[in-house]
């Protein structure tokens, strides 16, 4: 696999990736984030359907509404992804893994129906979604499972993952999360596959996650740090991560809504573009990735969102108007994804 990309339909030459979204979800279950609010109006929102009457309230607290947290309609996923293809898109990383209801065979069908190259994730999401027995498993056993996903296939599906992630971390990284990060590093050493790390969006513990991976032997130049859009005001933090070799991923494009439960804003496209320009000025162009992290109904065009084509239809024109050149845009959307998704050289042995 060295020098190749693994998709749900098989091995792909990196030159064929084209424009690539590096952090998305087509079929996913985010109900692990469900909470029981004290506010009675908020409680009423939990079981309401996503429709025009609830859309505004859900945009204030998208992870509170259970219907919004589930994408399980394959026909809808195909229709939405075709918009990305029609806009010039070619490939997508689906970061759904254990804890998020990964569906390998369905992803394979979606890839065939749309003509989009889909790279599937592996490993475990955040600690609150971990199996109860994960704390008893060894790092090596978890690494073995990830390696099997990458080299043989998930379970008995025969569908292979092409990426380790999104490996979940919390603000205070839990012991099982640390164990999974260490296992991800070992799996990377054995296969050469890239790693994608889920960071809690409003906190700044990317350096801690990199420390754990590096200590376990990971190649940080094949590591993606996700969900950095909400901390776009701290360019120094992002620059420090990029200079360690990791990819800084602005993956909340089009996700301009609030999370009232925790008093946070997901960030705007405008602020992300401002930060990206500053990072490029700091010499970090080749360590930047862009995506939407589409994972809820309200992000889909069917439900009033901007969909998987938002970057191509709306953000690229913004980049051009703000002085980004063709070379910079191609680097962000084609060259950087191609580089990080291409499997590297496995280690000769695993310590």
Image: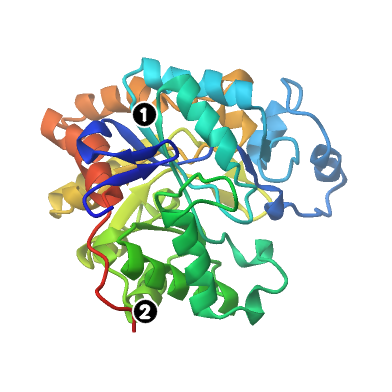
Q: Mark 2: few, some, or many residues within 10 Å (few <14, many ≥20)?
A: some
Circle on res. 216? 2
Residue identified by numbered label 1: 311
Q: Mark 1: few, some, or many residues within 10 Å (few <14, many ≥20)?
A: many
Residues under labels 1 and 2: Cα distance? 35 Å
Residue 150's place in the image compared with 204, above or below, is: above
Q: Earlier in the sequence, mark 1 or mark 2?
A: 2
Marks counted in the figure total 2
Residue 249's place in the image compared with 348, above or below, is: above
The coloring applied to the image is rainbow
Residues at discs 1 and 2 in contact (Cβ within 8 Å):
no
Q: Is residue 90 left or right of residue 64?
A: left
**Image location (x, y in percent) of residue 8:** 45, 39
> Circle 1 — which element?
helix
Q: Residue furthest bottom?
A: 351
In the image, 74 versus 209, the foreground residue is 74
Q: Is residue 306 left or right of residue 13?
A: right
> Circle 2 — which element?
loop
**Image location (x, y in percent) of residue 235:** 28, 57
Residue at image position (37%, 73%) is: 213
């Amino acid at each position: 696999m060295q020098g190749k990309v693994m998709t749900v339909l098989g091995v792909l030459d990196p030159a064929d990736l084209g424009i690539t979204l590096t952090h998305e979800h087509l079929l996913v279950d985010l109900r692990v984030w469900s909470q029981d609010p004290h506010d009675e109006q908020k409680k009423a929102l939990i079981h309401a359907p996503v429709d025009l009457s609830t859309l505004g309230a859900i945009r204030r607290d998208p992870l509170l509404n259970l219907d919004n947290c589930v994408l399980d309609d394959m026909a809808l996923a195909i229709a939405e992804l075709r918009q990305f293809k029609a806009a010039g898109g070619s490939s997508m990383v689906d970061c759904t893994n254990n804890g998020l209801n990964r569906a390998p065979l369905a992803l394979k069908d979606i890839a065939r129906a749309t003509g989009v190259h889909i790279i599937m994730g592996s490993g475990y999401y955040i600690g609150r979604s971990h199996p109860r027995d994960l704390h008893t498993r060894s790092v090596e056993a978890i690494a073995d499972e990830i390696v099997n996903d990458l080299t043989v296939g998930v379970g008995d599906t025969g569908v292979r993952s092409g990426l380790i992630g999104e490996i979940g971390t919390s603000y205070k990284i839990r012991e099982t999360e640390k164990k999974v990060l260490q296992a991800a590093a070992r799996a990377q050493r054995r296969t050469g596959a890239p790693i994608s790390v889920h960071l809690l969006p409003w906190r700044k513990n990317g350096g801690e996650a990199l420390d754990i991976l590096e200590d376990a032997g990971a190649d940080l130049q094949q590591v993606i740090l996700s969900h950095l859009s909400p901390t776009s005001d701290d360019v120094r933090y992002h620059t420090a991560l990029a200079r360690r070799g990791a990819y800084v991923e602005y993956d909340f494009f089009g996700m301009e809504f609030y999370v009232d439960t925790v008093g946070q804003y997901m960030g705007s496209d405008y602020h992300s573009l401002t930060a990206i320009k500053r990072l490029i000025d700091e010499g970090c162009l080749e360590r930047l990735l862009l995506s939407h992290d589409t994972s809820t109904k309200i992000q889909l065009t069917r439900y009033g969102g901007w969909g998987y084509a938002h970057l191509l239809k709306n953000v690229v024109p913004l980049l051009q108007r703000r002085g980004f050149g063709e070379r910079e845009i191609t680097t962000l959307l084609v060259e950087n994804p191609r580089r990080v998704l291409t499997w590297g050289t496995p280690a000769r042995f695993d310590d």
